[in-house]
Structures are given as C-alpha cells and as structure tokens.
Image: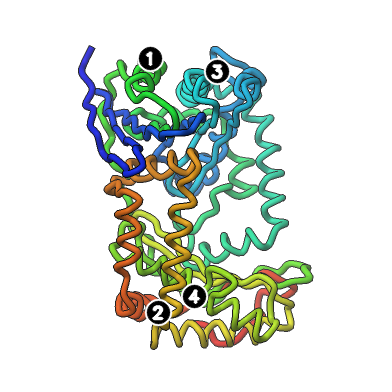
Amino acid sequence: MPKADTRTLLREGDGGLVRRTTLPGGLRIITEQVPGVRSVAFGVWVNVGSRDETGTQMGSAHYLEHLLFKGTHKRSAMEISASIEAVGGDLNAFTTKEYTCYYARVLDEDLPLAIDVVCDVVTDALIRAEDVEGERGVILEEIAMHDDDPTDLVHDEFAAAMFGDTPLGRPVLGSIETIQGISRTAINRFYRRKYRPESMVIAAAGNLDHAAVVRQVRRVFAPSLDAGVEQQGARKVRRPRPHAAGMKVTPRATEQANLVIGVPGITRSDSRRYAMSVMSTAFGGGMSSRLFQEIREKRGLAYSVYSYAQGYADDGMFGVYVGCLPAKVDTVLDVCISEIERLAEHGLTAEEISRGKGQVRGATVLGQEDTGARMTRIAKSELHDDPLLSIDALLAKVDHVTGEDIRSVARDLLTAPTTLAVIGPFDETTTFNAVG
C-alpha cells in the first residue's frame, strides 16, 4: 500500500495538536486534538459549490447535497439519520458558493460511526431517479421559503446586482426554472465528476487520535483512492465581469423595506482582511457600532442595521444591510451614504478601533470553544490553502491593525461606485437617493 504523507501543522498553547495526512490519491485528512472535551466534530468538505455550475446547472451543488442523504448501498435514508441520532449526535450539511460540507458531531466514543456514516454518504450515494423527483419538490419549497423571507433574499439580490449573471451572482439554491429542468443524468454526472478525493478535505476536531481517524477514513475511501484518477488540482477561478453599480429593486408587498448598499470588497486571502474585519465590526458590527448608533439610536430609523464583508477566492464584497419602513428608505440611504463617505475620508477614531479590535478578539477566541468551530477553522484553512495560524497569531494580526491600515482599506474600497438592492412595496422603476 502506498505511503501517506503526515505532518504536524500546529501545536497550540492549550495543548491542541493539528496534524495533516495526505493520502496517495490526493485526499487530505486534517485533525485537531482538543484536550479536555468529550465530543468530536467530523466533516467532509468538498471543494465544489454553486460557482462551479454552469447557468443551466444552477442549483446542482445544493440539489446534490440533499440527494446524498437519500441512501447508499449500505444504508437507507432512514438508517443514515437514525444511526447518528441513536447515539445523540447531529448530522447535517450545507452548500455555499465555493464549497459543500457534510458533517456530524458526536461523543468521542462514537467517532468511528460518524466517520463511517458521513464518508459513506459522500462516496456511495445512489442518486436514484425516484429520489431526484421526490427531492425536487422539497427544494422548490425551500426556494419559495427563501423568497418569502426578504431579509435573506435581499443579499442574493445584492450579489446579483453586483456580479450580474456570473457564478458569484447566481443564488446557491438555483431558480425554479433550473431546478425543474435538472435531470437525474445531469446531477449524477455532476456528482461523479466533482466529488473526487483530490477535491476533498476530511476534518475532525475534539478528543481523537489522528492515526485512528486516518485508518478509518482510508478504509471507507479505499475504492476511490485505488481508482488512480489523476488529480484535478485547484479550482480555476476567473474574476467575474466588471462590477455593476446602480440599483436593483424587487417588488414585494411587505410592511418593511429591506436594503443592502455596498461596494466590491477584498478576496479572502488579501493581507488587508484583518483591517477589513476590524473596520466592518466597528462600523456596523454591534450595538455600539457607528451605524447602529447613527441609524437606530440617534434617529430611530430602523430596528436592524449592520455591515458585513464577504471574501471569495478572487473577489469580495462589503455591504450595509438595513430593514426600515418604506417611507424611510431615502432618509436611511442618506445616512448610510454619508457615513460610508465619512469612513472613506477619515477612517475610524482610536476608541472605535479599540472597541472593534476587542469585538474581533472576543469572537475569535469564544468561537473556538466549540469543536465544530475548530473543525471548520482547520478545514477552511486546508481547503483554501491558507496558512493555519495559531489563535495567538490570529490575535496578534488583529492587534497590529493600525488606524492608517483602516483608512487605507476604506479609501481603496469605499470610494468606488455603490450598488444597491431593495426589496419592498415599490415599482421596479422606483428611484431612490443617488447611488453609483
């Protein structure tokens, strides 16, 4: 049997140990041994998301996520869910624009079961015609539910307005038309071509033994690894067409208007991401943030307001979300645009930067108290080929952010023409305060 390559990537100060093994077929297995816990989070991360679909395939990655739980040669759909629930564990999955994850969280003694079930689901799905038809209705219901929630839908509309008809501009769920049109043959072909060992990362965190995890995973993946398929390498990403500035209005008979206004952002690997994180947090990340104070506390214009940054492999976005009465949209936009311009020109105060750093530090540390969060951190690092930093190193990156760093990223990004998406009781031709 060909040898695997095993390396120690990180030793945390709290005793945590991160190790990675790469199997001959290209499958990567990364684990973090976490002292003092009795649980393990285990996940199979596939480097395939909605941006890997063509226009006619839109929604295939998410459709496939559903179908993988419908049965394998070893287990029925009922047996898949019941096996994990019988030991008190959680089993789930999610699809994003750049990857799909299948995961379970169980007691440490039940890790072998979790590995067997999750890997079985990912490697041996039947994708039967009757399951494709049965799940089609479920996904159409999910799209309808999503479309009925403007607080979610407005973010899809914002991405569509900014990126246009490109993979990053299309919704992860697909559309009613594409879901109705996807065939069993097409989705099975998508599965067979995309779900290869070299496109996957196996991640686990908790009370575990790395060598045991590798043995168990290798046993389940043996048929795929022995197939000798040539490695496909990293996803070839192409920068979307030039970003669109302007407005996208989606009419809905709602009592509240939901809007996102923003600009192109930075990639997830950009060295400025730490400054961006502090900036976004201080600007609109909590009740003490500038946007919350200006829009809700001082003026009473909205109940919910926040800013966020999203980075992809080759692009990104920065946005401000507000939910307000339809009659207040113009006033809200006036304040948002004014505050974005002020941030671009003057940056943040020393007090705001200090508070933003504190929030980012706290979220970073507190988020790692959970084995699921630790599993996610090491998996994303490996999947994206990003250096895995210790928590202390991450905190140091945040601490080293300066006022000039924030002013620089604000000037670079926030002076660009803005994009606006609005959902509410408006006509598609409705115009709002100058945007662009």
Dot 3: what SS? loop
Per the model, the C-alpha gap separating discs 3 and 2 is 50 Å
Classify mark 2: residues with Cα within 10 Å, few (<14), some (14-19) or many (20+): some
Residue holding disc 1: 219
Q: Is residue 61 above or below residue 253?
A: above
Callout in the foreground (4, 2): 4
Mark 4 or mark 3: whose residue is earlier in sequence: 3
Mark 1 or mark 3: whose residue is earlier in sequence: 3
Amino acid type for the residue under numbered disc 2: Ala
Classify mark 4: residues with Cα within 10 Å, few (<14), some (14-19) or many (20+): many
Amino acid type for the residue under numbered disc 3: Thr
Residue holding disc 2: 416
Residue holding disc 4: 283
Residue holding disc 3: 72
Mark 1 or mark 2: whose residue is earlier in sequence: 1
Q: Is residue 422 visible?
A: no
Dot 4: what SS? helix
